[in-house]
Amino acid sequence: MNPGELRQVYNELRGTARRLLRREPYDHTLESCELVNLAWARLLAGELRDLTLADPDSAVKLAVTHMRRVLLDHARRRRSKKRPDARVRIRFDDAPVFSHEHPDTFLEVDRLLEEMAAGGPDGRIRNGPRRARVARFALYGGLTESEISTLIGVPKSTVGNDVRFARAWLTDRLDGPC
Amino acid sequence: MDSSTPFVDDLFDEVASLDEQARAALLDRRCKDHPEIREAVEKLLRACDGLSEPTGDSPSHQAGDVVGPWRLETCLGSGASGSVWTAWDTHLQTWSALKLLHPALSDRPNAMEVVLREARAASAIISDHVVRVKAAGRVADDGPYYVEMLLCAEYLTEDGGTERVVVGRSLQDTPPSGVKAAARLMAHACRGTDAGHRVGILHRDIKPANILVTPVSGRALVTDFGLSAPELYSPPTADTPGTASVSLLRPGHSPIVGTPAFMSPEQARGETSTRASDIYGLGATLYTLVARQAPYQARQGAESAAWDIVDQVATVAPAPLRSVAQVPRRMAAIVAKAMARDPRDRYPTAAAMADDLERFVADLPTSGLGLAPLSRSWLFARRHKAPVITGAIMGGMLLVFAGGIWQLANIRDELQQDVATATLRRDEAQTAAADADIRAAYSRQEAARAARRAEEAASGAAAAAAQASAAVAEVLAATEWGEAQSSAASEAKELARRVSADAETALIGMERQRQEAIESRNLIELQLINLRAELSAQRTLSEELDAQLGLLQSDRSRLEIALADAERRADRLQAQIDQARAAALEQLEPAILP
């Protein structure tokens, strides 16, 4: 998949996620998406289509999980021998570009989120799992803070705090020895 | 680690939105026994602060951008809190002015409430001279805050007969030419400000940039009414110019918004704005328009222009208007009254200032005494002198009345003259007070200069002494070394003694100079005290004259009532004469006619 296609798929997914969260009726976007990538079409036509009708929230969560997998795969294919670059600004708003241009940093960010979910290196992060989850919806799903708040039932201010903490944590950790 | 050890993430959430000081205080308290947690949190805070910077210069808006229902056309200007655009409302298909607040404001948690509260209040003002607020809010969840206002624009018919929309500019961009034009526009601005005051809303930031002029009909409109909330502005930095809106925080006061060059003394001191502060702003704007320079300028070498002006505003009066520009005395009096240091000495309302400005434009007396109606009744009295000649016996009576009216008019004229003299003397006293202020400031500068001279002289003396002692030491060394050449040595010793004596004399002379300088400084300080006393005496005189003026005014109004009464009675008499004459004619007619 080239970055243009990747981005198109991503935007479709993000649009679908938005509509699902707003409980808007199903439209033809999924069909246009089928033309872009067969794998995505299978996913959207299969598991996701059933879920869409019964449980839109789960559909979004599943889609974000798949999105993450695609983006990580893409980054892995482009991985270089370089160390992750601390000066790269971590983009929560345009994951396809991020994973394409800075594959190493993108993979490292994913690993660090894993670490955060586990409570950090010395276990002094209490709400690691929730914070990592919020960060993933923002990073891979491209969802806004209020969308995440509706999706996982957490106040918007908490979501904002979580995103801010995740950014600070990632920036700090990328800067340090890794 | 025990259970009371704080968690890094919880602590970070707590301190991240605080400022530097509050952060340190909270961390001190929570991490007394856990330096490693503190270090971890501080590392995260550093990372977080580094991140928030780029959001400040996040892409601003461009012409053609679509924001909510609006399409941005032309940027009319951008300032401390945001940018203002000509915007096409795609729903209503009409033009609007759209103020988009800086994206950085979205980070301040209560910015939304502030914008809405202020805009809601401002939309309550209904006046031909205030730019109305149409709507306010946030475009989308993560979009910019906006305030939609009526566009200050008019249609202009071009040569070919086509209509073109022209947008009005501010008084800062297009200053009026001439004192009368400035007075006319500022009268409008006063009316607009007064409309706000009457519904209880202060502007807090009146300046040329916040007064717009319609391009064709030339009406002035006050804009940004009520949008001066401290939450929307930043404190001044080293390169903030004196004409930018800033938020000021003085210890022990709540934050104040304003523009240093047009800010009232009480605002500059950190006190709360009042209606009188807005009246001062109108005065400072008028000053700027007629003098073609702001009342205060940053001094050379000042560290921060904005703070330097704020300090000047808080402590000294501006240069009197007539000392910087050629303007009529009556105009200078209006500006001086609006910009009085003490809010109680200013115009009681913006409408009173508008009245005076309108009278100035119409060449009527501006003392606020309203002589125009009197001139009218004077003419009325003259018109009624005709019946005095035609009437016979009743005419005689009328003459008496007319004489009374004549006398009353004379008394009134005298009173008028008295009032004018009193006003003149009060103006003179005010000018004298302002002059004394300047002289006091000058003397203070003189004293400082003299002190500096004395210090320099003293340090010069010290340097000379040091030089002399060095010379002595040198000569002594030479003496020791050349013991064998005793004659040369003794000569050198003699020289050294002479040099040392010279230095001594110089030292004494310099000491005397220093004493003199100190004396002259003391003298100047004494003069300063005298000047201050004179100043307060002048002020007292000015207040007394004000009181006299009030008495004269009330006398005059009583006389006016008496005059009106006399006129009414004269009218009645005239009617009676006419009737009597008609009756007499009727009776005489048959006798005369054949």
Image (tube, coloured by chain):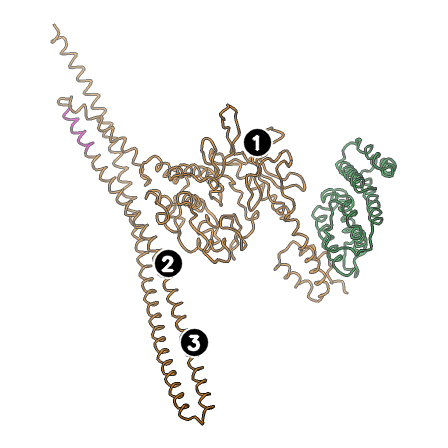
Chain colours: A green, B orange
| Magenta span contains residue A151 | no
Asked whether residue B67 appears in the rendered view, the answer is no
User: In the structure shown, which secondary structural element does the residue marked by tag 2 occupy?
Assistant: helix
Residue B481 drawn at (x, y percent): 47, 90
User: In the structure shown, which secondary structural element does the residue marked by tag 3 occupy?
Assistant: helix
Which of the 4 image quadrants contains residue B67?
Answer: top right
Residue A152 drawn at (x, y percent): 77, 44
Residue at the spot of label 1 = B95
Above or below for A141 versus B16: above
Who's the residue at 24% across and 41% down the image?
Answer: B417
Name the disc covering residue B441, or none: 2
Badge 1 amino acid = Trp
The quarter of the picture where the N terminus of chain B appears is bottom right
Above or below for B158 versus A106: above
Q: Are marks 1 and 3 in contact (CB under 8 Å)?
A: no
Dot 2: chain letter: B
Dot 1 crowding, Cα within 10 Å, few <14, some 14–19, many 20+: many
Residue at the spot of label 3 = B463
Badge 3 amino acid = Ala
B390 displayed left or right of B523? left
Q: CA distance from mark 1 to mark 3?
A: 74 Å
Q: Which residues are magenta?
A: B395-406
